[in-house]
Amino acid sequence: MKRNKAFSLLFILLLSSPALAIMNIKIEDTDVDGVKARKLNCQLSQASFMGSIMMTAFLGSNKKTFESCGLKGKEVSLEWVWNAGKVDSLKLLNPNDSTLAACLSKGLQGQAIEGSGKCQGYVSVPY
């Protein structure tokens, strides 16, 4: 009986370890509410089985921002960071277009997204 309790305690300690709290998600290709994402790599500060759904829902819910910035029919490479449930920063990695970068940054800055993390990938609004 003591052995089972020790194993259970060890298992609980391992699960609560901060080293295990980070979750890496890779999404090869997805389309959500008219926003297409590919080669999406995310690092979430808290492991969650809903992580991939959360990331794709965030992109889909911002379709109007992407369209208003002129992303319809274009693909861009983005990197965004969020902390405490809000987007902190966004970088347009490709193409080198400062007007598009400023528009996307302004439109997505402060947008709600659960937890904290960082993502990089290709985003487009094909239709």
Image (cartoon, helix red, strand yellow):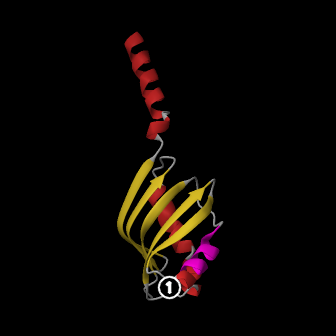
Residue 105 highlighted magenta (yes or no): yes
Identity, as a three-letter code, of the amino acid under mark 1: Leu
Q: Taking 1 as reference, is 33 left or right? A: right
Q: Quadrant of residue 89?
A: bottom right
Query: Residue drawn at (48%, 49%), measured in percent from left and top?
Result: 48
Q: Quadrant of residue 58?
A: bottom right
Q: Out of 18 and 13, give the one closest to the viewer.
A: 18
Return the residue at label 1: 71
Prevailing secondary structure of the magenta residues: helix
From the viewer's perspective, is residue 84 above or below residue 61? above
- For disc 1, the neighbor class at 10 Å (few under 14, some 14 to 19, many from 20) is many
**Residue range corresponding to the magenta coloring:** 101-109
Residue 23 highlighted magenta (yes or no): no
**Circle 1: element type:** loop
Q: Out of 71 and 92, give the one closest to the viewer.
A: 92
From the viewer's perspective, is residue 89 above or below residue 5? below
